[in-house]
Image (spheres, rainbow, N blue to C red):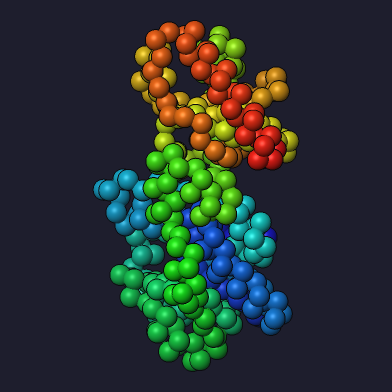
Amino acid sequence: MKIYHSIDDFPKLTNAVVTSGTFDGVHIGHQRILKRLKEIAEKHNGETVVITFWPHPRLVLYPEENTLQVLNTFEEKAELLKEQGIQHLLRIPFTKEFSQKTSQEFIDNILVKQIGTKKLVIGYDHRFGKNREGSFEQLKLNGPQYGFDVEEISRQDVDDVGVSSTKIRKALLEGDIETATHFLGKPYSISGRVIKGEKLGRVLGFPTANVDVDSHYKLIPAEGIYTVTVVHAEITYGGMLYIGNRPTVGGTQRSIEVNIFDFDKDIYGENITIHLMGSIRKDAHFGDLEALKKQLQADKVFALRELQEKKWL
């Protein structure tokens, strides 16, 4: 997959099959659109193009809210789109200036002149352009004039899936990993760099890798303990993840740390990816470190059993 970080870098194609949107999470609803995009491209010997926007438009249009947490960093989103078999990914920097472009300007300057769109596939009720004025009806009206066809994923297809990025965010913030996984079509992941911590886990017999997450906009699930798989240097390990402020030792800042099973390497400064497979329990305060250690031993037994029984490794 080729990635373009500016519209000016995109080479106009002779037979572009295009879709656009934020695609946060690249969930099963998005995957229906992408599947249709590929079907059309294969049938008409075209090339698939996804137009996405970064940062997320809401972060630019409503900065005072400061509440939106995204499911993917751009790099994670790009990797997911690559896995879906997309050939071209155009990242358009979303700015206040860009948000003022009319839907007609978007059609003229981007879809037609810059990309060479021959077929456009959009989700049900997709809106675009200044004040979200652009619609499927407008695209259908302008399509023949500009030499491209438009196809809308039906309302029934969207409603049957019953998924949205908002629903996934809600599930993760409640620690409902099963629902999030179902809607995403795969486990939710967190990527980041391993940093030095206070080494309390080592004292307890459960050494952990403390993770500095790539983006402060990235959604972090509810505090608690989770069964996870961890990818380091293209090798996958089992493990258990802790998210919380370590109340037993009077912690005040949220920590994201993972105990990687059967692993004894110095990986400070290196990147790892954590896939959340299931929830073990909520965070809790224990009377002393010995009680915490006993609970961690029970957590590990639970996690190992889940990894084995559900064939997550």
The picture quadrant where one finds residue 40 is: bottom right
Given residues 307 and 187, the one toward you in this image is 307
**With 310 as the anchor, is 22 left or right in this view?**
left
Q: Residue 131 at x, y = what percent?
A: 30, 70
Q: Quadrant location of the C terminus?
A: top right
Residue 22 location, x and y as percent? 46, 60
- Indicate whether 103 appears above or below 91: below
**Quarter of the image where the N terminus is located:** bottom right
Does residue 166 show up?
yes
> Front-most of 107 and 38?
38
* Relative side of 310 to 64, left or right: right
Q: Residue furthest bottom?
A: 145
Task: Classify residue 140 as left or right of residue 35.
Answer: left
| 65 left or right of 33 in image | left
Q: Residue at x 57, y 54 (%)?
A: 185
Q: Is residue 113 above or below residue 200?
A: below
* Towards the viewer: 33 or 313: 313
Residue drawn at x 56%, y 9% is 203
